[in-house]
Amino acid sequence: MATAEITLDSDIQSDTLALVKSSILNKGGTQALLDQTTGLNKIIFTATTNVILLDSSAAGVGKAAKVYIANKSTDSSEYVTITINAQIIGRLYAGDWMFIPWSQSDAAGNIELAPSVATALPVEYMTIHEGLTPVSA
Amino acid sequence: MATTATISIQNDVTDTIFTVSNVATLTKRGNEESLDTVISATKTFTATSAVNLIAVAGFTATAANKVYVANTGDSVSEYFTIGIESEEIGRLYGGDWMFIPWDANTDDNITITPSVATAMTAEYMVFS
């Protein structure tokens, strides 16, 4: 069983916030558990080119994959821009992470990434999913 | 003033069990100044039409905003489809949550579409 838990702590408000939310990662529409993963990957980017980080797959369209991406840079000015099918989601600055459901709405629903600098920007990512279509040799 | 977001993913999908943990201190774009505004709300939906959950109006564009959204229900079959502008990101089934950076550029509203019309509830927070 895979689980994902977020803890948000904040003292922006006069009453401090301490939110904890944990979820069991199921397949879409069922209590069956997600049972496949890419494992945790790390890439050090040395160009600012927009690249496909995760390729939308016919086997994953309309399903309940989960995606984790983290910018492991330590320079606060460096970021990666995350897009899905050319729609900008946002920028992950150094130390930031994101966790999303990814339904791969169609073949163009790739998750893409564009580093802000070409000077060795490390990114970690992982997907836990229901299936990927293998690329033919 | 500081906000931290911590994730812990426990993964036993593979024979070798592993945990991924990460702590982010939420700062404004390009510097180490803390995000200093938070909006928190809960909404219950009783129709399946797509609506704006969070509109860009009032937020700084191309900023380091962060958004948390959760489906507070416990149904494994009912879900919210979450999108930005016209692009679908994914589905939040009962108990699922997501945490994203949000660019908040023109028209980048975060949209939500319930799968059923029988009182589904979402909670969300925006740190900006």
Image (cartoon, helix red, strand yellow):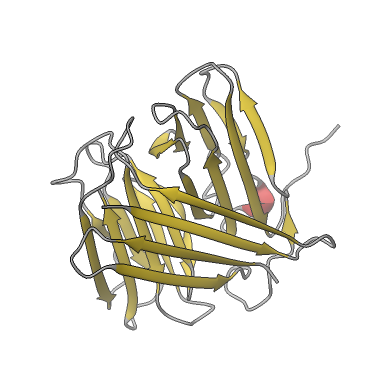
| Vertical order, B18 against B64 (above or below) | below
Q: Position of residue A123 (x, y in %)?
A: 58, 35
In-front residue for pair A117/B114 = A117
The residue depicted at 50 percent of the width and 53 percent of the height is A99
Q: Residue furthest left?
A: B58
Query: In screen coordinates, is B38 left or right of B83?
Result: left
Q: Position of residue A102 (x, y in %)?
A: 53, 53
The residue depicted at 26 percent of the width and 52 percent of the height is B1
In-front residue for pair B77/A47 = A47
The residue depicted at 32 percent of the width and 40 percent of the height is B64
| Vertical order, B53 against A125 (above or below) | below
| Vertical order, B115 against A117 (above or below) | below
Residue A116 visible somewhere in the drawing: yes
Q: Position of residue B44 (x, y in %)?
A: 27, 77
Residue B85 falls in image quadrant: top left
In-front residue for pair A99/A77 = A77
The residue depicted at 51 percent of the width and 50 percent of the height is A105
| Vertical order, B4 against A113 (above or below) | below
